[in-house]
Amino acid sequence: DQQVKQNSPSLSVQEGRISILNCDYTNSMFDYFLWYKKYPAEGPTFLISISSIKDKNEDGRFTVFLNKSAKHLSLHIVPSQPGDSAVYFCAATPGGYQKVTFGTGTKLQVIP
Amino acid sequence: EPEVTQTPSHQVTQMGQEVILRCVPISNHLYFYWYRQILGQKVEFLVSFYNNEISEKSEIFDDQFSVERPDGSNFTLKIRSTKLEDSAMYFCASSEAGQGSTGELFFGEGSRLTVL
């Protein structure tokens, strides 16, 4: 039951260029969408989120876009830096302290 | 910066043995969670805990699993009789009121469980 899907297991981008990570979801009950970043041997770290009433949220180099009609969200990183190399998990929740459902992750490699 | 700490970092056990994984959540957080990640797969929800009781659990969290907050600081996950398929990285997470309602969780570094 893959309610949150990340179809690209990996992505390579040159330093300074834009990284675009994509995510699709199926559950219409999700109200909040999040991106978590994970380095090897560490736990996931919250990066940025968006609520279902918005279509864009920006935090520095990171922007998340939400297209509710297509049940699709994306994370843009501009400009990409080598330190951004990590696994990025898309996640979603109905809110109200209900469980957070994660995607399978996309491994981003930023090449210097 | 406050953090969630987990012990042990790695535990190897024989099938059928009991295992207890320990977590110290961030001190002012009220909501506690266990997730796990089998190698190469997605991070899966196991259980959430609030006000000294389970608030939600997944189908994975069967009778072999239990959670406890034995004192004011620790949060434990017990697996009564481990199976080979329990081998995974187990992540503890906590959240405070407000942030947790929108899915913002603070994770520990994980405890790797290997069942032989």
Image (spheres, coloured by chain):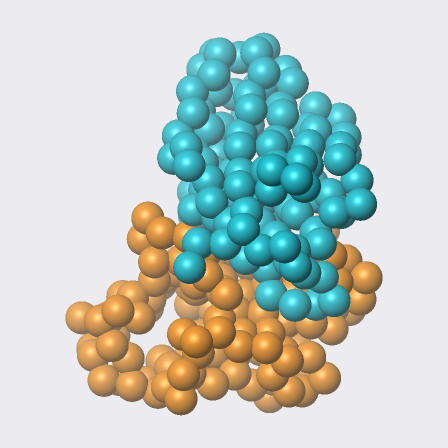
Q: Observer-nearest residue: B96 or A2?
A: A2
Q: Using the rendered view, name the quadrant where residue B86 is placed.
A: bottom left
Q: Is residue A82 above or below residue B80?
A: above
Q: Is residue A22 visible?
A: yes
Q: Residue at x 69, y 79 (%)?
A: B50
Q: Is residue A47 visible?
A: no
Of the 4 image quadrants, the one containing the N terminus of chain A is: bottom left
User: Does residue A52 appear to the left or right of B66 in the view shown?
Assistant: right
Colour of chain B, in one word, is orange
- Residue A86 appears at what percent x and percent y? 48, 34
- Residue A39 appears at what percent x and percent y? 48, 40
Q: Residue at x 63, y 71 (%)?
A: B32
Q: Using the rendered view, name the quadrant where residue A8 is placed.
A: top left
Q: Observer-nearest residue: B50 or B11?
A: B50
Q: Residue at x 58, y 10 (%)?
A: A16
| Chain seen in cyan | A
- Residue B19 appears at what percent x and percent y? 36, 80
Q: Is residue A52 above or below residue B60?
A: above
Q: Using the rendered view, name the quadrant where residue B99 is placed.
A: bottom right
Q: Residue at x 28, y 80 (%)?
A: B82
- Residue A15 appears at what percent x and percent y? 53, 12
User: Does residue A6 appear to the left or right of B5 in the view shown?
Assistant: left
